[in-house]
Image (cartoon, rainbow, N blue to C red):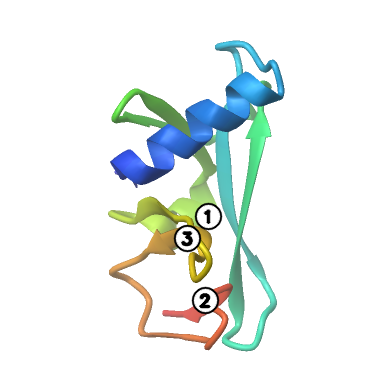
Amino acid sequence: MLFVANSAKDKIQEILTQQKLDEAYFIRVSVTSGGCSGLTYKMDFDNESQPNDQIFEDNGVKVVTDLRSFLYLCNTTLEFSGGLNGKGFYFNNPNATRSCGCGESFAV
């Protein structure tokens, strides 16, 4: 399961409205090789499902990931922190054994 915190839900709905994206759009999350800790998160809006997609809905937000990425993301919560010192969107991933200082990269 992938989870969406209230802070992320509110920001996602704000972006969808600003960009005039309809309810067919969802959040696509993936994990790719790279970054200083070995793996990095990628997040986009998408409206086309792919074979082997894992589809979750939490807090009224549809989140889709590929099967390989889900192995790294299981039980992860998408969060948002705004303000001057905010991180923007970030992932609270209980599977990560370490992460880099910028929070963009992690290892399991």
Q: Quadrant of the C terminus?
A: bottom left
Q: Few, some or many C-alpha atoms within 10 Å of disc 3 (few <14, some 14-19, many ≥20)?
A: some
Residue 90 - label: 3
Residue 2 at what x, y percent from top left? 34, 45
The answer for how far apart the CA atoms under marks 3 and 2 are is: 8 Å
On the image, which quarter does residue 27 sit in?
top right
Is 63 on the left or on the right of 49, as rendered? left
Residue linked to disc 2 = 103
- Could one spot residue 54 in this view of the protein? no
Q: Is residue 7 positioned above or below 97 on the image?
A: above
The residue type indicated by label 2 comes to: Gly
Q: Few, some or many C-alpha atoms within 10 Å of disc 2 (few <14, some 14-19, many ≥20)?
A: some
Q: Is residue 104 positioned above or below 56 on the image?
A: below
Is 97 on the left or on the right of 20, as rendered? left
The residue type indicated by label 3 comes to: Tyr
Mark earlier in primary sequence (1, 2): 1
Q: Nearer the viewer, mark 1 or mark 3?
A: 3
Q: Name the secondary structure under disc 1.
A: helix
Mark earlier in primary sequence (3, 2): 3
View extreme (front): residue: 84
Residue 46 - label: none
Q: Are marks 3 and 2 in contact (CB under 8 Å)?
A: yes
Residue drawn at x 64%, y 29% is: 50
